[in-house]
Image (cartoon, grey):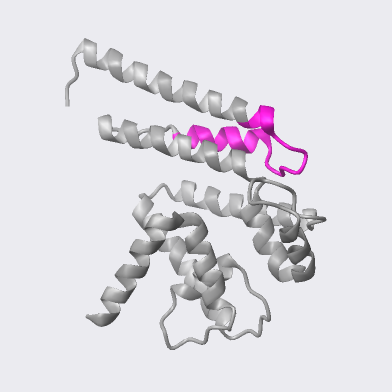
């Protein structure tokens, strides 16, 4: 596609706007960062740089979705201090401490009491290694998602044969994507429904419930 000079200037301005939005998001997070937030400025800045990248042949719809994604990410990082990762680790490793923490916090980024910093940092590092491997592969998002899901299925199969008295949302997701003949622990439904309801919100959760019932009846 050949662009006129005016169109090129407009596309340049939009890219600059994305950079400005990302910078505002970063500064907003940095100025509100609590002592309990385990994420580093480099980590947040690097991910924002990834978010503002547009496809090679991007259009106005791609630009609009990118802006919406950055705003969604801003809301996410301002609401939590890596809460999802910490909560999933603590829920299994230290269920009593997790319950106490839950009683003393709202889901708005407050600290989980006395969480295992070393384990959390190790799992952050592992996730970064996985992400780096994906980037090195340089494949499309749909292929990357398929590969990640294959890893998650393997983890799910392993979880199904273990005797975990307590699970977490991440474990439930892994168990949700393996065939029905595998065993699921008693906590599976509660963890999966908690995860989906919190992340999808009320409206999408209702639509999902309705879709599951409709598919069951067909």
**Residue drawn where x is 50% and y is 69% of the image:** 193
In the depicted structure, whether residue 140 falls above or below residue 87: above
Depth order, front residue of 82/136: 82
Whether residue 197 appears in this view of the structure is yes
Where residue 106 appears, as percent x and y from the top left, is: 67, 51
**2 or 63, which is in the foreground?**
63
Screen quadrant of the N terminus: top left
Quick one: 14 or 94, which is closer to the camera? 94
Predominant SS of the magenta segment: helix
> x and y percent of residue 138 in the render?
41, 47
Residue at 70%, 70% in the rendered image: 92
- Residue for point 66% across, 33% down: 41
193 with respect to 142 (left or right): right
Residue at (53% x, 63% y) in the render: 195
Magenta residues? Answer: 29-51
Q: Quadrant of residue 29?
A: top right
Numbered label tally: 0
Would residue 32 be counted in the magenta stretch? Answer: yes
Residue 73 sits above or below residue 96 on the image = above
Name the outermost residue toward the top: 5
- From what the image shows, is residue 20 above or below residue 102? above
19 is within the stretch colored magenta:
no
Residue 57: tell me if it is visible.
no
Residue 189: % across, % down: 52, 76
Image x and y of residue 217, in percent: 25, 81
Quadrant containing the C terminus is bottom left
- In-image side of 1 versus 40 (left or right): left
């Amino acid at each position: 596609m050949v662009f006129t000079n005016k169109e090129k200037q407009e596309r340049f301005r939009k890219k600059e706007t994305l950079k400005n939005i990302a910078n505002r998001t970063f500064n907003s997070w940095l100025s509100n960062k609590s002592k309990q937030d385990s994420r580093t400025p480099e980590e947040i800045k690097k991910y924002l740089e990834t978010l503002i990248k547009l496809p090679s042949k991007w259009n106005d719809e791609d630009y609009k979705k990118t802006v919406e994604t950055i705003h969604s990410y801003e809301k996410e990082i301002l609401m939590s201090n890596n809460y999802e990762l910490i909560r999933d680790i603590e829920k299994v490793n230290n269920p009593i401490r997790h319950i106490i923490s839950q009683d003393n916090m709202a889901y708005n980024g407050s600290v989980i009491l006395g969480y295992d910093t070393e384990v959390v940092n190790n799992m952050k590092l592992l996730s970064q290694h996985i992400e780096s491997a994906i980037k090195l592969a340089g494949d499309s998002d749909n292929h990357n998602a398929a590969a990640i899901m294959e890893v998650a299925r393997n983890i799910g199969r392993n979880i199904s044969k273990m005797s975990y008295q307590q699970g977490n949302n991440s474990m439930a997701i892994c168990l949700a994507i393996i065939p029905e003949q595998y065993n699921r622990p008693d906590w599976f439904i509660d963890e999966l429904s908690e995860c989906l309801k919190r992340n999808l919100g009320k409206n999408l959760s209702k639509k999902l419930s309705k879709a599951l019932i409709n598919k069951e009846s067909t």
